[in-house]
Image (spheres, rainbow, N blue to C red):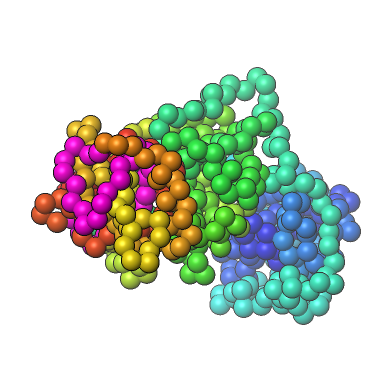
């Protein structure tokens, strides 16, 4: 039983002087006729058969291992197990402490978009069959009685030195005679159109809307980048994310996702990314789309195919979170997002291609009002407050910056000081707004280049913000791209 990138079971049979090995994601079963996917992987040395302990980070199979079951086996058909395996089918009888009776391992044809060497592990009908058997109800090692958690926490547990994993080694080069599409360099990312309310539709999938920094991850053999929508190097801001260079099982690869800070319940919050220059708690890259893999430009491939391949390519799921989805049931997901105090959900049309623009094939439905605004000035502070009183906010409408309100709450003393210095460095004498500014204190103007994230209760009839609160700076957003997000009809 092996907790590496994901929890799975490693099934091994001694054959030809080595351990022929299969990874069984759902584990073995005694339920007669049940077919369990078993991915045939590289052979392991015989001295690995009794190993129980931890494989260090950065090595192949990094994680914790217990001897979930062990014993001997005999062939039910044939004379040489190595020959049977080479032929694509082996029938055998297990004499283990947990698993007993006749089983079959048979090679199957991979799906069109599937990688690796898939087999099926099947429990044959005999006196050891158990229709109610669940391997998860038997989590202890037959060697020590320990669980995976016990081994992971044991400082005296054995370690196994394997080899560098994909996190620290470049994936093998593809053969030179295989045609490869060039790695895409998109000028912009696919963006969603905001709509007024959730909907159900079997032709759409729905995901949680992540609340963080949108970033495109490109991993090549000698090059790695993680850039925001406006081209900022996000590894400079979050150095820990350099580990993404080894987080995927295929190189080159181009992944679209969001840099987020997750709490203990898996909820993202943009503000946590602002709180410290140190590593934010729960720093994660939420991956939701795949633009390139296995030498193929996937932007014209259907959405569901891109996502299915993306899920299989993730090796380091402690750093990369695959953005799961539901089909058709947008209303229920939205209700759950609101209950969990999340920002909202994203709807994506099944079969849609990846378009480098804002599209109606992707829609976003927010549980509240939150968006970016351009800072065009500030007001002088009152009383004991230092720095500034409020930021003057605007959005672009038909190419001109329009004043929509001011925000004076949500700042701590450190942010007031940092922002005040930044504002004074871009101060100018004239207003950048096309309309009049309403303020209750003397104003100062700035060049409209600073972008901030603000939460507010609603837009008023006069198109001003009601009850705005500052959430953080948005260096990843270009000021010229900031417009008012007014919801439209879903379809």
The front one of 79 and 29 is 29
Is 328 on the left or on the right of 41, as rendered? left
Q: Quadrant of the N terminus?
A: bottom right
Magenta segment includes 433: yes
Q: Say if the magenta span includes residue 442.
A: yes
- Give me the residue at 40% from left, 56% from top: 387
Residue at 58%, 21% (x, y): give it.
179
- Is 266 above or below relative to 206? below
Q: Report whether residue 174 is seen.
A: yes
Which residue range is magenta in the image?
431-459
Would you identify the image quadrant in which residue 340 lies? Answer: bottom left
Q: Nearer the viewer, residue 116 or 264?
A: 264
Residue 116 visible in the shown view: no
Query: Residue at (67%, 21%) from the top-left corner?
Result: 176
320 in relation to 95, above or below: above
Residue sitting nearer the eye, 220 or 484? 484
User: Residue 128: x, y in percent?
Assistant: 67, 75
**Extreme residue toward the left, this view:** 461
Across and down, in percent, residue 129 comes to 63, 73
Q: Residue furthest top?
A: 177
List x then y, in percent, for residue 446. Answer: 33, 40
Is 226 placed left or right of 390 in the picture? right
**Residue lying at 26% horizontally and 45% vertically, measured from the top left:** 394
- Vertical placement of residue 202 versus 305, above or below: below
């Amino acid at each position: 039983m092996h907790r590496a990138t994901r929890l799975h079971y490693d099934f091994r049979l001694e054959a030809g002087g080595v351990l022929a090995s299969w990874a069984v994601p759902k584990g073995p079963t005694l339920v007669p006729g049940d077919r369990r996917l078993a991915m045939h992987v590289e052979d392991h040395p015989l001295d690995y058969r009794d190993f129980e302990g931890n494989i260090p980070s950065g090595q192949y199979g990094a994680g914790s291992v217990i001897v979930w079951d062990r014993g001997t086996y005999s062939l039910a058909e044939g004379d040489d197990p190595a020959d049977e395996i080479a032929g694509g089918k082996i029938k055998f009888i297990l004499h283990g402490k947990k698993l007993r009776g006749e089983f079959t391992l048979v090679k199957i044809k991979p799906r069109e978009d599937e990688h690796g060497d898939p087999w099926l592990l099947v429990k044959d009908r005999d006196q050891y069959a158990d229709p109610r058997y669940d391997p998860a109800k038997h989590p202890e090692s037959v060697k020590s009685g320990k669980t995976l958690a016990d081994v992971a926490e044991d400082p005296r547990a054995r370690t196994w030195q394997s080899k560098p994993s994909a996190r620290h080694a470049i994936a093998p080069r593809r053969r030179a005679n295989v045609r490869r599409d060039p790695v895409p360099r998109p000028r912009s990312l696919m963006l969603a159109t905001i709509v007024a309310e959730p909907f159900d539709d079997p032709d759409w999938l729905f995901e949680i809307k992540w609340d963080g920094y949108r970033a495109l991850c490109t991993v090549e053999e000698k090059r790695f980048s993680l850039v925001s929508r406006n081209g900022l190097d996000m590894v400079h801001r979050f150095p820990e994310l350099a580990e993404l260079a080894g987080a995927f099982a295929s190189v080159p690869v181009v992944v679209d996702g969001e840099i987020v800070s997750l709490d203990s319940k898996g909820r993202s919050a943009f503000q946590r990314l602002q709180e410290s220059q140190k590593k934010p708690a729960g720093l994660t890259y939420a991956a939701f789309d795949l633009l390139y893999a296995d030498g193929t430009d996937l932007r014209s491939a259907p959405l569901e195919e891109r996502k299915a391949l993306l899920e299989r390519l993730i090796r380091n799921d402690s750093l990369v979170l695959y953005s799961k989805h539901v089909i058709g049931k947008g209303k229920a997901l939205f209700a759950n997002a609101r209950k969990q105090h999340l920002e909202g959900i994203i709807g994506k049309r099944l079969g849609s291609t990846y378009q480098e623009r804002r599209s109606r094939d992707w829609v976003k439905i927010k549980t509240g009002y939150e968006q970016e605004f351009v800072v065009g000035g500030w007001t002088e502070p009152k009383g004991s407050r230092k720095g500034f009183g409020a930021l003057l906010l605007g959005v672009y409408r038909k190419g001109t910056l329009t004043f929509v309100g001011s925000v004076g709450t949500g700042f701590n003393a450190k942010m007031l000081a940092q922002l005040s210095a930044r504002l004074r460095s871009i101060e100018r004498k004239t207003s950048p707004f096309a309309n009049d500014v309403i303020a209750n204190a003397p104003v100062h103007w700035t060049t409209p280049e600073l972008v901030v994230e603000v939460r507010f209760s609603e837009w008023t009839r006069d198109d001003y913000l009601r009850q705005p609160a500052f959430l953080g700076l948005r260096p990843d957003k270009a000021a010229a791209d900031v417009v008012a997000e007014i919801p439209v009809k879903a379809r």
